[in-house]
Image (tube, rainbow, N blue to C red):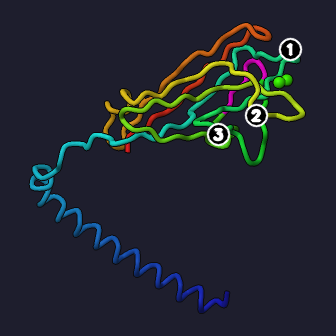
Amino acid sequence: MPRFAKDAKREHTGRNNMRSRKTMAALALAGGLVTPAVLAASPAAAAADSCRVTLYDIDAGSVADRDGRDELRFRVEGNLFPRFDAKYHPMRAGGDGDPADFEHPVAIISRTEDVRFNLRETEGPAWGAGDSLGSVVARGSTCAGLDEGETEIVSETLEGRQPTKYEYVVRIKLTGQ
Ligand SMILES: [Ca+2]
Ligand SMILES: [Ca+2]
């Protein structure tokens, strides 16, 4: 960029900053004056009509597969996650998995619906639905207690002995909307 263009740009930015500072001062003053009226007119937080349910976290205490590494998927409303870029997410004992590892499992429930986040251990070469390791359930009754934008995390320990002793802590998040 030529020098004169840079100078012009800097000057322009400087003017904008000055204008925005003035605008902010004016808004702050106006805000101070109208605050009591705004508070009086502010409605109570709206109750959620539905909830968005997402995976929040998964931690592996011990894994099910005999080879020491589980090939995991979540099944949610008939859909397997991960589903596009990968067939499973591998975890070993002590591992910590994130929503992105499973391509962000998600469901929407009403105030009267439940949804299961069903953890599954799968086998190659097909890497299909595999076997259930247990489920965490997001309940409509929990959703009904939330306001719009409010969140609640449901934590569940999934454990069993087939084919070997395993334990996972799975957390899902409900967000009112
Ligand atoms: Ca394995
Ligand atoms: Ca496996």
> What is the quadrant of the N terminus in the image?
bottom right
The location of residue 88, given as percent across then percent down, is 77, 35
Relative height, residue 3 to residue 42 (above, below): below
Query: From what the image shows, is residue 118 above or below residue 23?
Result: above
| Residue at the spot of label 2 | 89
Q: What residue range appears in magenta?
A: 92-97
Q: Label 1 CB, ligand 1: below 8 Å?
A: yes
Q: Residue at x 68, y 19 (%)?
A: 133
- For label 3, the crowd category at 10 Å Cα-Cα, with few meaning under 14, some 14 to 19 and many 20 or more, is few
Horizontal side, residue 144 vs residue 80: left or right = left
Residue at the (34%, 77%) spot, across then down: 19
Counting residues from the start of the chain, the first of labels 2 and 3 encountered is 3
Q: At label 3, which amino acid type do we have?
A: Asn
Identify the secondary structure beneath mark 3.
strand
Q: Is residue 17 left or right of residue 162?
A: left
Which mark identifies residue 173? Answer: none
Mark 1 residue element:
loop
The span from disc 3 to disc 1 (Cα, nearest Å) is 26 Å
Q: Say which label, 3 or 1, has the lower sequence index.
A: 1
The yes-or-no answer for disc 2 within 8 Å of ligand 2 is no
Q: Which quarter of the frame holds ligand 1? A: top right
Image location of residue 41, percent across then percent down? 12, 53
Q: Amino acid at mark 1?
A: Arg
Q: Which residue is mark 1?
A: 66
Mark number displayed over residue 79: 3
User: Few, some or many C-alpha atoms within 10 Å of disc 2 (few <14, some 14-19, many ≥20)?
Assistant: many
Is 141 positioned to the left or the right of 94 in the image? left
